[in-house]
């Protein structure tokens, strides 16, 4: 059971310290660098990163001693009465977060150190470190933020930092464009994330109102507590939006958000392009930390995702397919960083496979080991690229084993780890995921299929990674003499490499497989976070071990249901979730695996399956050695070897970029042009038309006015003039005439009066 | 030289004295209690007008001082508005007043504070009545801030940015007219947000219209006549619809709650009233026949929609913006657009709640169309300023969507978006102006790679772009996410489409950034000068709140959430009651 959080007052520093570093370097770095050189710049940045590591260690120890810790800063969204949107700006570290914190701040600090060597010739050195610190701050917000909204701040914030760092060499247009692509593709995911968040908020508000459950819905801790209320879960599961249960739709939408950030099908396309950034950035952001945010998010919300069989199936299938798909693209890439990029996409697929089948601990385990060996691989490639004078095509390398010994050995160890060779970290984490996939009872499809695909992808990984190692480190050097003469390893670069290589070896012992009998340290550590999800997940191995556990659980559920008064509405509303869980357990008992496969659902079976996958990986390595170990093969050679069609398809990444360009970007541009055309000609046209009509009317009326109305007026005037002209003649000026007129007039008057 | 400097010093000194004295007198009259009457809200809109009169009377030889006077006349209202906002008590909301008899003893029944209420034309029931509630207080602060910034920005373009390089300035000619008009404009828009009398509201509304026409028509760009006439006629048509609705509402008003007539502040009574609070809570208009409501609602809505501007009435905006000088664009986008949505809340929502409920989905749909239409049109632009103008259409669509959602989150998000958009768009138009002053064109494809030569400028525009595309942690996000969360509860499908705008907005913003700032440097602009301190001075007051209220929106949200929740409840429950 998760214990109540302890209030602490130092967590905000995790965000503030790197931001302070970013601000210092960002605002004053230019002047400082001109005046005092590069030293103060990286001292500030490394100090900030190292401080976060120290705080992370402190947080880890605190969590270890007394459960989760929390810091509430201030009410962030508070709309008073009448709104459920009450979110405090709060940081929270629990078991899951503490692991993530150590990974992010630890690997982050190492990469800061590495960067001092790799970036030493760069002029805007200050800018690089400012942005790197900005990234650290945002990433730490992402993992410590205790609400959807604060996580989203970090989520978008790391996207911004990634955009800035990918476009670090912004004077080269393609690199700037790569940054934009990354941001936009991530925004597609964010769109789904926001809709999913709004949907879950809406459903949870209704469910909370119906069941009188209190809590701030957008806060993870509160939401997780609300999901411990059976009545609330029942009400939530019944909610539908647009005809689909919210639990499925909402979780899938959140997962689409994760496919953006974590580079899964269909939104992985930005990650290979993101290699335009400096190599340490690729190591930190695009391998070890930021891209794992999606996995972290799903584990953070495991209590929610585990309730949706549909979403879990989607996650597992997408993860599994991505693992294979990206691995095959990695086959013929010639850019050393691109190979690693596709391998990252592929390994992230494994993590999603892990969390998708319900093994949340295993997903985080692979996240951790991957952070170690992939960061090591990327930094190793950085060391190579640095030595090769910023050339990253493999055709310019070869034979670097002797020239860059530290790089070679660390790179080699990490390659063994990623290939799943027993004893190294990648082996343990990958095989836990594969085994859990084989054993899962949580999906709509049999997990054995996923296992098969996963094992094939693992063999592919072993193949292309060793192809990389042989192409780069073995055979004759292909670089020009000048480069080879100057090729050397920088001390700031080798130290992080060695540390990471050690971790890539040792990290695996935190999660030993069950058949060894040793405790799975990481899984046990994460227990308080994932236990709620574990209620909703079942495994076939439990059957092999006997039905007792499941039966006991069913019995206790039955007792719970019996206690409820089913005649009342309240009783019915609470029973739904319990019945759902009971059905799941019953399915576990009745589901009899086909006899042949059944034998593998045991610890012994796990051991055998593991052996099988290792064997396949070794075969793949052997194949790589046969093909590449003794001679360099250029793309033409490979094309001849593997067939033109296959080579073309894989080298061009299945033409996905082209398909997106044709079916997404071009229509969007056409829509944009069409909208503006309509705006100009129709909407504004109507306005101008009405103005024109008014003008015409005015002209018509004006001319009518001139002829008739004014004509009338003028007519009267001229009439007057004519009459006046006539009348004027009367006025002669002679007195006799006047007297005559007066007499005549008077006579007439008198006559008239008399007559009338 | 010396004389000029002494003028500056003198004016600054005068300004400083005025800044310290005036607020204290205003507050002294009102006393410490915000619920007491005070003349503060009369000072705010009339100080700029007084400034305009002073400038009008100043002899030509003091031409150099016009701008200082104008600056002071806009700075004092800003200080007063901030003081007012700090003293504002957000717990006082119009509660329990609906359907009761009109009364004048206690303004807090209607949620009003800082009331100044005197007789004006008693025979018609017209009064001089100003006050603020939670909805308007933020808008008053915004309008005073934007006015101040705009005058500071015109101050800036008055002087060539760099005389040696021959940068031209927009407002070198006819300074007297310019500063008089811009101050009148400021008066009008501040007045609109404080007026609680329909008649007074309409007067302020029209006062603001004419200066705008001249400011665009005289100091504008090449097609200024067309833009000015278009703006004027369009807005006039809106005003006309409003006026008809106002008269209609006036003649349909009759007191509720057993009262026989509406009381007036001079002790007399009136058969019909212009008092907005009476019309909202104590008159038959909001509670009368549905037909009455409908007709008035549509007329008002069209009148305000033109100002917002809502699709399909938005085409005056890009033209007006492109032709208007920078400071006028800042005012136009920063404040004038908000008057449309403010008017909707104040009149349609508050006075005609039943019709509002009836039409709320339509409002949301128009919001959605505006969001997407504006965003797509923005993407298609090659003129930087026109792009920002269309992005305003898109962002004001969020306000409509939030208002149409009739949820607490949506409506609060809408008003927050109004505030945030004022700041962000203000920044954007200033920034567009700065680059135009230097390069004399705004063609997006005519630059390239200038981040290298103007890093500080790039930094500011990065901040403004990110705030505009709703990056979390900046103020644009707060309003947007609240609108989405609120709107989803009532209109899920509309909201899903609306959220796609986060992709499109990021698309055109980043694409713009890339075309102007990234890539290889266009050698033509290799010696572009970066921002000078005056340009800093105009941006920083906008940029700081964008960051601060993005992280800590509490102070702003607290200010209006009570009032808006009450308003929202009014709309939802009135319809149920009838």
Image (cartoon, helix red, strand yellow):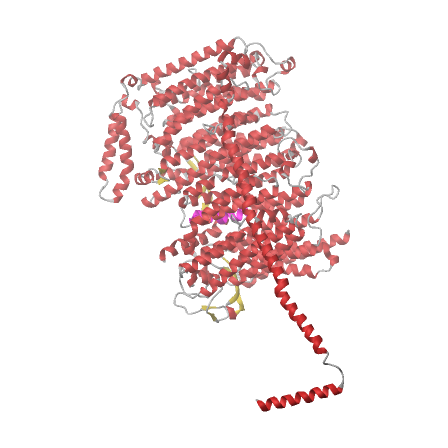
Quarter the N terminus of chain A occupies: top left
Q: Is residue B406 magenta?
A: yes
Where's residue B403, x and y in %?
A: 46, 49
Residue A309's quadrant in the figure?
top left
> Which residue sits at x=58%, y=30%?
A176
Q: Which residue occupies the foreground of this view, B20 or A609? A: A609
Please tell me whether residue A620 is drawn above or below residue B491 in the rendered image.
above
Which secondary structure class fits the magenta region best? helix
Where's residue A521, x and y in %?
A: 39, 24
Q: Which residue occupies the foreground of this view, A575 or A751? A: A751
Q: Which residue occupies the foreground of this view, B242 or A553? A: B242
Considering every residue shown, the one lying at the far right of the view is B1
Where's residue B110, x and y in %?
A: 45, 60
Residue B208's quadrant in the figure?
bottom right
Q: Is residue A541 magenta?
A: no
Quarter the C terminus of chain A occupies: bottom right
> Does residue A723 show up?
yes
Horizontal relation, residue B73 to residue B415: left or right: right
Horizontal relation, residue A727 to residue B292: left or right: right
Horizontal relation, residue A572 to residue A309: left or right: left
Please tell me whether residue A708 is drawn above or below residue B402 in the rendered image.
below
> Does residue B27 show up?
no
Where's residue A104, x and y in %?
A: 49, 29
Please tell me whether residue B71 is drawn above or below residue A49 in the rendered image.
below
Q: What are the residue bounds of the magenta stretch? A: B405-422
Q: How many marks?
A: 0
């Amino acid at each position: 059971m998760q214990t109540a959080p302890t209030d602490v007052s130092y967590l905000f520093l995790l965000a503030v310290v790197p931001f302070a570093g970013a601000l210092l370097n960002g605002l004053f770095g230019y002047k400082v660098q001109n005046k005092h050189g590069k030293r103060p710049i990286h001292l500030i940045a490394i100090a900030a990163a190292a401080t976060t590591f120290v705080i992370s260690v402190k947080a880890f120890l605190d969590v270890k001693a007394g459960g989760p810790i929390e810091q509430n800063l201030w009410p962030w969204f508070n709309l008073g009465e009448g709104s459920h949107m009450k979110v405090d700006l709060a940081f929270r570290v629990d078991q899951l977060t503490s692991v993530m914190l150590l990974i992010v701040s630890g690997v982050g600090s190492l990469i800061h150190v590495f960067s001092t060597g790799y970036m030493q010739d760069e002029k805007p050195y200050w800018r690089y470190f400012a942005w790197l610190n900005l990234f650290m701050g945002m990433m730490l917000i992402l993992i410590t933020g205790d609400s959807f909204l604060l996580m989203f701040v970090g989520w978008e914030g790391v996207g911004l930092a990634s955009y800035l760092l990918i476009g670090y060499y912004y004077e080269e247009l393609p690199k700037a464009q790569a940054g934009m692509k990354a941001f936009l593709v991530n925004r597609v995911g964010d769109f789904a994330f926001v809709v999913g968040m709004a949907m879950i908020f809406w459903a949870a508000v209704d469910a909370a109102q119906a069941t009188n459950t209190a809590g701030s819905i957008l806060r993870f801790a509160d939401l997780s507590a609300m999901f411990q209320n059976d009545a609330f879960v029942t009400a939530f599961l019944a909610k539908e939006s647009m005809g689909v249960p919210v639990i499925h739709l909402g979780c899938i939408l959140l997962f689409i958000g994760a496919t953006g950030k974590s580079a899964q099908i269909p939104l992985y396309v930005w990650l290979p392009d993101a290699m335009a950034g400096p190599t340490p950035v690729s190591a930190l952001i695009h391998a070890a930390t930021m891209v794992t945010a999606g996995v972290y998010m799903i584990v953070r919300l495991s209590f929610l995702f585990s309730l949706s069989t549909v979403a879990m199936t989607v996650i597992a299938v997408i993860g599994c397919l991505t693992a294979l798909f990206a691995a095959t693209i990695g086959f013929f890439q010639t850019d050393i960083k691109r190979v690693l990029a596709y391998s990252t996409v592929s390994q992230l697929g494994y993590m999603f496979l892990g969390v998708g089948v319900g093994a949340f601990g295993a997903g985080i385990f692979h996240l951790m080991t991957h952070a170690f060996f992939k960061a090591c691989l990327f930094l190793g490639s950085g060391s190579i690229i640095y030595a090769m004078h910023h050339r990253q095509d493999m055709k310019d390398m070869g034979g670097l084993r002797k020239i860059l010994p530290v790089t070679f050995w660390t790179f080699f160890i990490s390659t063994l780890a990623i290939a799943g060779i027993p004893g190294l970290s990648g082996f343990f984490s990958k095989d836990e995921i594969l085994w859990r996939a084989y054993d899962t009872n949580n999906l709509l499809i049999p997990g054995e299929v996923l296992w098969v695909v996963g094992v094939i992808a693992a063999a592919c990984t072993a193949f292309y990674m060793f192809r990389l190692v042989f192409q780069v480190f073995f055979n004759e050097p292909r670089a020009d003499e000048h480069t080879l003469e100057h090729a050397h390893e920088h001390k700031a670069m080798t130290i992080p490499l060695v540390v990471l290589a050690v971790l890539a070896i040792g990290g695996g012992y935190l999660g030993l497989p069950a058949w060894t009998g040793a405790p799975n340290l990481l899984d046990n550590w994460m227990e308080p976070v994932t236990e709620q999800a574990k209620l909703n997940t079942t495994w076939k191995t439990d059957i092999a071990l006997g039905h007792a556990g499941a039966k006991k659980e069913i019995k206790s559920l039955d007792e719970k249901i019996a206690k409820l008064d089913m005649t009342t509405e309240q009783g019915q509303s609470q029973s739904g979730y319990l019945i759902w869980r009971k059905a799941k357990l019953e399915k576990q008992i009745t589901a009899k695996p086909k006899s042949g496969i059944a034998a593998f659902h045991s610890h012994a079976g796990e051991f055998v399956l593991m052996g099988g996958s290792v064997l396949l990986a070794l075969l793949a390595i052997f194949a790589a050695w046969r093909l590449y170990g003794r001679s360099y093969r250029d793309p033409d050679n490979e094309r001849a070897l593997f067939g033109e069609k296959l080579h073309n398809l894989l080298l061009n990444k299945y033409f996905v970029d082209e398909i997106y360009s044709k079916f997404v970007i071009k229509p969007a541009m056409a829509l944009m042009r069409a909208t503006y055309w309509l705006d100009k000609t129709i909407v504004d046209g109507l306005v101008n038309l009405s103005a024109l009509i008014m003008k015409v009317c005015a002209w018509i009326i004006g001319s009518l006015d001139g002829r008739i109305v004014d004509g009338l007026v003028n007519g009267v005037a001229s009439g007057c003039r004519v009459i006046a002209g006539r009348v004027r003649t009367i006025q002669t000026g002679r007195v006799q005439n006047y007297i005559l007129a007066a007499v005549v007039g008077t006579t007439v008057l008198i006559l008239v009066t008399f007559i009338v | 030289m010396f004389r000029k400097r002494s003028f500056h010093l003198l004016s600054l000194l005068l300004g400083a004295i005025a800044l310290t004295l005036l607020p204290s007198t205003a507050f002294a009259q009102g006393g410490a209690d915000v619920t007491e009457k005070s003349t503060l809200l009369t000072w705010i809109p009339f100080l700029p007008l007084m400034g305009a009169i002073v400038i009008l009377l100043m002899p030509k030889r003091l031409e150099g001082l016009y701008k200082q006077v104008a600056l002071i006349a806009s700075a004092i209202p800003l200080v007063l508005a901030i003081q007012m906002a700090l003293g504002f008590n957000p717990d006082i909301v119009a509660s329990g007043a609906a359907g009761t008899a009109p009364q004048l003893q206690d303004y807090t029944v209607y949620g009003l504070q800082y009331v100044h209420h005197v007789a004006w034309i008693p025979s018609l029931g017209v009064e001089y009545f100003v006050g603020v509630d939670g909805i308007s207080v933020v808008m008053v602060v915004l309008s005073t801030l934007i006015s101040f910034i705009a005058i500071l920005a015109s101050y800036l373009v008055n002087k060539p940015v760099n005389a040696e390089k021959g940068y031209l300035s927009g407002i070198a000619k006819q300074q007297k007219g310019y500063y008089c008009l811009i101050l009148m404009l400021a008066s009008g828009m501040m007045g609109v947000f404080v007026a609680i009398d329909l008649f007074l509201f309409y007067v302020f509304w029209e006062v603001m219209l004419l200066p705008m026409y001249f400011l665009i028509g005289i100091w504008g760009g090449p097609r200024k006549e067309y833009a000015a006439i278009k703006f004027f006629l369009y807005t006039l048509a809106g005003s006309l619809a409003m006026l008809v609705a106002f008269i209609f509402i006036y003649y349909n008003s009759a007191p509720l709650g057993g009262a026989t007539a509406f009381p007036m502040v001079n002790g007399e009574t009136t058969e019909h009233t212009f008092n907005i609070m009476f019309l909202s809570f104590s008159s038959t208009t909001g509670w009368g026949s549905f037909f009455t409501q409908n007709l008035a609602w549509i007329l008002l809505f069209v009148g305000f929609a033109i100002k917002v501007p809502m699709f399909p009435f938005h085409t005056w905006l890009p033209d007006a913006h492109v032709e208007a000088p920078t400071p006028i664009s800042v005012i136009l986008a920063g404040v004038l657009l908000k008057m449309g949505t403010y008017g909707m809340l104040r009149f349609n929502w508050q006075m005609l709640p039943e019709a509002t409920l009836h039409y709320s989905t339509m409002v949301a749909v128009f919001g959605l169309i505006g969001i997407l239409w504006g965003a797509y049109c923005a993407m298609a632009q090659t003129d930087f300023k026109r792009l920002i103008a269309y992005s305003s259409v898109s962002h004001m669509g969020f306000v409509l969507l939030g208002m149409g959602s009739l949820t607490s989150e949506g409506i609060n998000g809408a008003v927050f978006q109004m505030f945030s958009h004022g700041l962000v768009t203000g920044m954007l138009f200033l920034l567009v102006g700065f680059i135009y002053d230097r390069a004399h064109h705004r063609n997006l494809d005519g630059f390239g790679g200038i981040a290298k030569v103007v890093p500080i400028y790039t930094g500011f525009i990065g901040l403004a772009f990110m705030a505009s595309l709703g990056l979390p942690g900046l103020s644009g996000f707060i309003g947007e996410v609240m609108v989405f969360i609120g709107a989803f509860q009532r209109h899920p499908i509309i909201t899903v489409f609306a959220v796609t705008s986060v992709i499109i907005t990021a698309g055109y913003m980043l694409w713009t950034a890339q075309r102007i700032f990234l890539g290889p440097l266009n050698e033509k602009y290799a010696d572009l000068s970066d921002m000078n301190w005056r340009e800093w001075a105009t941006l920083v007051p906008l940029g700081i709140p964008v960051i601060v209220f993005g992280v800590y929106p509490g102070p702003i949200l607290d200010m209006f959430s009570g009032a808006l929740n009450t308003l929202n409840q009014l709309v939802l429950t009135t319809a149920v009651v009838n």
